[in-house]
Structure formats: structure tokens, C-alpha cells
Image (spheres, rainbow, N blue to C red):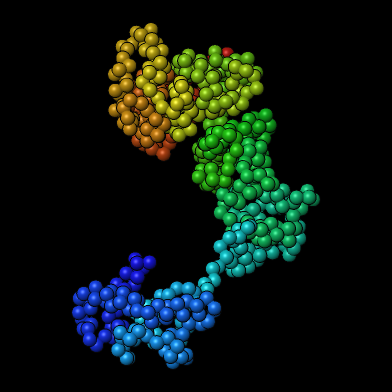
Amino acid sequence: MEAVVGRDAASLDPELLQLSEVSSFAIKEKPSIAEALYWQWLSLPETSKLVKSLIEEAKGGVPLNVQGSSSSTNAAVNHPLPSMFPAGSVPPLSPRSTSGSPRVMRRGAGAGPSPFGSPLKVVSDPVREVIPQFYFKNGRPPPKELNEQCLSRIDHLFFGGESLQVQEFKPVTKEICKLPSFFSGALFRKIDVNCTGTVTRDAFVDYWINSNMMTMDTATQIFTILKKPDSKHLTQEDFKPILRELLATHPGLEFLQGTPEFQERYAETVIYRIFYYINRSGNGHIILRELKRSNLISVMQQLDEEEDINKVLRYFSYEHFYVIYCKFWELDTDHDFLIDKENLIRYGNHSLTYRIVDRIFSQVARKFMSKTEGKMGYEDFVYFILSEEDKSSEPSLEYWFKCIDLDGNGILTPNEMQFFYEEQLHRMECMAQEPVLFEDILCQIIDMIKPEKESYFMLRDLKGCKLSGNVFNILFNLNKFMAFETRDPFLIRQERENPTLTEWDRFAHREYIRLSMEEDGEDASNGSGDVWDESLESPF
């Protein structure tokens, strides 16, 4: 109570005391004078009666009368002020408000200044601001002008309201929806839910405009068209319809129409490549965020405009498929579409060590999709060859990091790296090459990667260095290790001339040339020393 009183006394305005006997300047200079007067006033019997009377009135619900109100005269009569104040110098009571605050009085917008001359700010009623709708369950509806333009084009393509069949639907997909033409069948079936074989104008308007598909970004549109109803992700099965339509309509794939078995293999390979690069979680489910972060949409749009399928290097190149399939075919000697450790050890002219092959078949990097124990299927091989031939990509770095991380603790220690390098060292000695001690190799790797801590390597250390793929070549691929040591000037010049090409692009190009020449009966080998086995039956 004393603290409250003291605070109130200290906040008194000397002008409000109206004491003629005491200079207001003296009170301002010495606030203790005002505080002493305030305490003296509180100690008077009349003040005590006045306070008690006001408290009783407040409890009884009687409005408080203050100076300046209509009943101020009665208040002065009923509650005489202590005689210590001269007549006419009575300090006003603190203003009261119905809100319960003794310091703030609500006043209307047209109210005049306070009769007490108080410096307190006038609080006006808050203005209610109307917030426009910002959430729409089915997306933001299209603007009126855009809606009218789209309806005009729809009326033109639907010939005055007639229904369209699937073979007539491609202009709608390209001109109105702005989607690749090979999405025409998938979009048609999405609208024709009852499988009537036709799509009416009203059904298309309801799907594309009324459900706000038109205002979605392209990635969301494609995701919505491909996914199953009520699903929140895409599976490999969801991509098969557009791959079938691509094979049937793209001019660069017409030559495959007479070999349906290889049409199927091509479609599978494309899907495996898509999931390898986009489905970073590795769970077989591509979510919308992963699709938006990828370059798949732009690649599909490029594919729809480019007649030469091999110029679309990402995902869809037929030459890349040819290389992958032929490499698998030459390892699969019994052609049961499965390969084991002994098959894989022959990859790249025996360039891999036994220890890394054991780790691959332990499935620590990726669980095999093959149902046969101890065997790798075609899908598993696609993941392997993409990781092996392009160690600069993030999926590849993650793949090999898991293989080298023996205890799975998320870091690579010198002991783990030495375990794999020991076999490399032994192979160099057997080949009468000058061995490079691991201590020297470790120093070279540290200088190359520049990890946060020199005692171990983390995955982010490797992802932050363009040369990190060479670390894995040093540890388990002898041919590529020696190529890195010799630094072939021809390969360096090629890289500078085509900086946009990846390691995989260069490998696939070299291999395709070699395989094409072998197909013509010529003897050729690729830059890594791989030799085609002429006794092997060609898959094409």
C-alpha cells in the first residue's frame, strides 16, 4: 500500500495542487514537499471519511461524482474537503472509468478536452478492419478476365459444346492446359471418371476451371493428374501411363514400336532414373515438394518440343537407356535378369574391389528390390551404375557414403577409409605399380575436401566439394583412381569444352559409341578399358 501511495504521490502534477502558499517551482524541484503534503492530507479525519464514503458508494453501484459532472455541486456538499486546502484550491479526484482503469477514460470521437486538464491520451474505439479471404480449399479462383479467356478457347476447341474423344483431346491439353502433349491421355481419363470414352465441355470446365486447376502451378497440376485419388504421393506405377503415350507418339521413339519388350524396358529405365534423382528419401514415394524441387517438369516440356530424344539428356535419352541395359546384359551371363557378386565384380574390367562389392550386396546403401536373396535385379543395377559413373551427384555421394560408413554413425573415420584402401594398395602391388601409402592418401583427401574437422569426414563435407567423387574412386575403383592420378589432358579439355555435361553424360556417350561400333562388328574399348564380350548375345 505504501509503495502505491508513494508512486501516486511522486506522479502528482504540482500545478494540480493549486497551493498559493507554496511555489510550484519549489515543488517541481523538491517532489518530497508534494509527497509530505499528500501524506498529511491522507492522515486527516475528513479524508478518511471521504475515502470510506466513496468506497461504500462504489460497492452500492452508485455512480461516482467528480468535479465537472452534473452532480459536482452535491458532491462538494456531501464530501467536504479537508480544511488544510484553501478555498478554490481543491485538487480534483482521479477520473474514473467503467473499464476499471483509474488512468484511462474512454471518450467519443467528438468529445472535447478533459475538464481536468489531464495529459493522458484519449483512447478511441478500435476500428474493425476487414481481412480479405486468403485461404481457399481448392486453390484461389481464377481472375474474371482469365476465366473468360479460357472459356472462349474451350468453346472453340469443343466445337460449340460437342464431346471430345481421347484422340481429339491433345489440343486441349497443349493449348488450354499448357501441359506436354503426352499427358493428354492421363488428363482425359482423370476427367472421364465413368469411362464413357468422351469428355464433354461442361465436364472439362468443371474439372479445369471450377476446381481451380487452372490457377495451380504446373508442378501441382501434373502431380494432381498423375496421382491416385486421395493419395499424397506418386509411385512408379503412376508414371507408366504417360510413358506409354510418349512411346506411342514421340517421333524419336518410333523405331521401338516393333519391339514392345524394349519399349517396356525403356519405360522402366526412365522411371528408375526419375526416382533415383527426385525421390531423395528413397521410400518409393515422390511427394509434391520433391517434384517442385526437381527439374522434371522443365525436362518434360523440353521433351515435348524436341524431336531428337537423345538431346534430352536428363531421364529420357534413349542412348543412356541403351548403355545401361547393355551393361547389365553383359554382366548377366545366364540372362535370368539377375546378377550376383561374381557378376558385379567384373564390372568395368574388374575395377571394383571385393570389399565394396560386399558392401553393395549387404544393401546398406539401398535395399534391393530383387526378391531373390543374394541377387541384384535390373532396378538395383540402375541405381548402382548411376552412382558409380557419376560420383559428383548428391544421390551418388549418399550411396557411397553409406557403403564406406561401416558402423553407420554418419561419419567416415580414417580407420574406415583405410579398411577399403588396403585392397587397393594390394592390387597396386600385384600390378607392379608404385604403391601410395594410406597416410599420404589421407593427407591428399584432407587437402581436397577441407572438412570441418580433420579427424573425420561428414556427408556435408563431401557435398561441399566438387572433387569429392574422387575420394571414393581412390578407396575402391582402381581404374578411376589411376586415371585421376595421371590427369588425362584430353579428358580435362573435354570437361572444359562442355561444362554442362555431367560425368554420367560423358560416360554414356563414350559407351554408346563403343557399343555401336561393337554392334557393327568393330573392335573398340571405352576410356576405362572395358572390352565388349563378342560371345555375348546382343539384346538388340
Locate residue 115 relative to residue 347 in the image: left or right: left
For the C terminus, which image quadrant? top right
Q: Is residue 352 above or below residue 400?
A: above
Q: Residue at x 20, y 79 (%)?
A: 26
Position of residue 29 in the picture relative to residue 537 (left or right): left
Q: Position of residue 265 (x, y in %)?
A: 63, 30
Residue at the image point whose x is 74% and y is 51% from the top: 192
Quadrant assignment, res 463: top left
The spot of residue 115 in percent (x, y) is: 39, 87
In the rendered image, the residue lying farthest to the front is: 45
Q: Is residue 111 visible?
A: no
Q: Is residue 515 left or right of residue 82?
A: right
Residue 289 pos. (x, y %): 54, 45
Q: Residue at x 66, y 44 (%)?
A: 231
Q: Is residue 447 left or right of residue 367?
A: left
**Residue 138, x across and y down, in percent:** 63, 57
Within the image, what quadrant is residue 18 found in?
bottom left
Whether residue 471 can be seen here: yes
Q: Pick the residue in front: 294 or 128.
A: 128
Task: From this view, report whether residue 237 is shown above or below residue 216.
Answer: above
